[in-house]
Amino acid sequence: MARVILVTGGGRSGKSTFAQRLAESMTGRRAYIATCPVIDDEMAERVRKHREARSAAAWTTIEEPLDLASVLRSDGGHGICLVDCLTLWVNNLLYEAGKEGRDVTEEEIARSCSEILEAGKGRPGTVIFVTNEVGLGIIPENPLARRYRDLAGRCNQVIAAGAETVVLLVSGIPVTIKGSL
């Protein structure tokens, strides 16, 4: 049964760097499960920089914007899986649902997150999830942004409840708020 760690914090707080270093401090084959679709040149450059930062440590990159549970269930060869990030995954689910003319409910997100947790815990090693705390600021002014904030918040609550360890990054400083590293 895998150990599950959730790394959370605000935008540009150092979450991904911390999670990567944490994963690289562990022994075993590492998989980076990327949820970010490349939609423009700026995002392509961000992805390139992330890949470059992982290149020396023998990471396998798996790009999966939607079906994280299947990737976690099917990939048994990596003892360490880093999923970066859950808030982009929620965005992707919301976007796909919008294209289909339907909405995503908090209950659906909670079920999907429970499925991800079950898949992650069902494998050997360690699974590290990265997410953003999007609800710490001003209440968004439009319904879609509020829906996204609510869905991301529900996702974070479910994953945090099931994780053995939760680390909050504040200005690059990790603060363990649940369990231990």
Image (cartoon, rainbow, N blue to C red):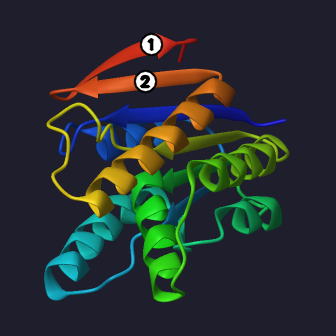
Q: Amino acid at mark 1?
A: Ile
In this rendering, would 148 be left or right of 143?
A: right
Does residue 25 appear in this view? no
Q: CA distance from mark 1 to mark 2?
A: 6 Å
Asked whether 6 or 173 is in front, the reply is 6
Q: Residue at the location (76% across, 67% down)? A: 70
**Mark 2, residues whose alpha carbon is within 10 Å: few (<14), some, or many (≥20)?**
many
Asked whether 162 or 51 is in front, the reply is 162
Q: Residue at the location (35% across, 47% down)? A: 149
In this rendering, would 164 be left or right of 24?
A: right
Q: Secondary structure at mark 1?
A: strand
Q: Which residue is mark 2?
A: 167
Q: Amino acid at mark 2?
A: Val
Q: Residue at the location (19% across, 40% down)? A: 139
Q: Do the residues under discs 1 and 2 have CB atoms within 8 angstroms? A: yes
In terms of sequence position, does the residue under pointer 1 or pointer 2 come before the other?
2
Q: Secondary structure at mark 2?
A: strand
Q: Position of residue 71 (x, y in %)?
A: 71, 67
In this view, 6 is above or below 149: above
Q: Which residue is mark 1?
A: 177
In this view, 64 is above or below 138: below
**Mark 1, residues whose alpha carbon is within 10 Å: few (<14), some, or many (≥20)?**
few
Q: Residue at the location (64% across, 63% down)? A: 68
Count of marks, rendered view: 2
